Amino acid sequence: MNSTIIRVGQGTLGFMHSEGGTPTYHPYPVKSGMSIAANLRTAFKEETFLVGGGSKAVLLVSSPTLLIPTSEFASYDNFDADEVYGNVITGHKGEKKIITDISELNATAVFPVNNDLHMVVSDHFPIVDTRNVMAGVWRYLYDNYYESGKQRRLFAYFHDKVVDICAFGQHRIHFANSFPATHAHDALYYTLFIWKQLGMSQTNDELYIAGDMPHGDWLLKRYRSYLSHVTTIDHNDNIPFDITICE
């Protein structure tokens, strides 16, 4: 690992870096009453492993993502990320908008990052690669689990008190949306609603799950009572799945 990864979730902060050639994850105890940017400034003063962390940082943020088909994005003469994003997703006015190409899935992603947060990272690293957690997850799921054929697959990734549900078709993102998942009953409802909306088969098609499910044992049991093929993607429960697949 050549870069320090700084993961910013919904009120959470964590770091992945190399110690003796071994990637190591450090969750940071966020102080209430302080912004994440302020907490990050404090972390740079308190955490010795951040001193001399290298020339590059990956800033991995969990924030709402707008997906645009590549062909539609290419049709814009003067693409205004703030205007387009703000017309679809509210509450992030004035934040820095990042545009990410996901060409292998025929999509372009637009997501916001807090300006102060980005500035704090830039103050300590000359190169900052800003990414959204879901861009990497979509790529990983597609590369490792998507297969065309008779069985269709729905994917549910739990993180930061939401569940991101997606499906692929014809080598592109067929469906992607994010839903609140603080409560297991809500997560179950949203997943099964999308399953039905996409016309998937309870007996033939497959559900793949990753991340930190609320009341995981109960929720997994309920999924399996409705659907015949439910698979959990193994990962370290103490480390966010999206940071482990960040390259």
Image (cartoon, rainbow, N blue to C red):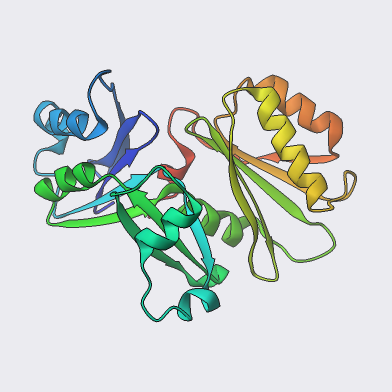
Residue at image position (84%, 53%) is 199
Residue at image position (46%, 61%) is 109
Which residue is at the front of the view, 28 or 94? Answer: 94
Which residue is at the front of the view, 52 or 76? Answer: 76
Please state the horizontal and vertical placement of residue 68, each as a whole percent of the image.
52, 66
Residue 168 is drawn in which quadrant? bottom right
> Does residue 217 lie above or below 67 as drawn?
above
Question: Is 135 positioned to the left or the right of 106 in the image?
Answer: left
Which residue is at the front of the view, 3 or 180? Answer: 180
> Does residue 142 lie above or below 205 as drawn?
below
> Does residue 165 lie above or below 127 as drawn?
above
Residue 20 is drawn in which quadrant? top left
Question: Is 45 positioned to the left or the right of 7 in the image?
Answer: left
Please state the horizontal and vertical placement of residue 219, each as a whole percent of the image.
71, 25
> Does residue 45 lie above or below 191 as drawn?
above
Please state the horizontal and vertical placement of residue 62, each as a whole percent of the image.
41, 42
Which image quadrant: the C terminus?
Answer: bottom left
Question: Is 42 positioned to the left or the right of 89 in the image?
Answer: left
Please state the horizontal and vertical placement of residue 157, each as a whole percent of the image.
58, 41
Residue 180 is drawn in which quadrant? top right
Q: How many marks?
A: 0
Residue at image position (12%, 26%) is 46
Residue at image position (22%, 23%) is 34
Question: Is 150 positioned to the left or the right of 93 in the image?
Answer: right
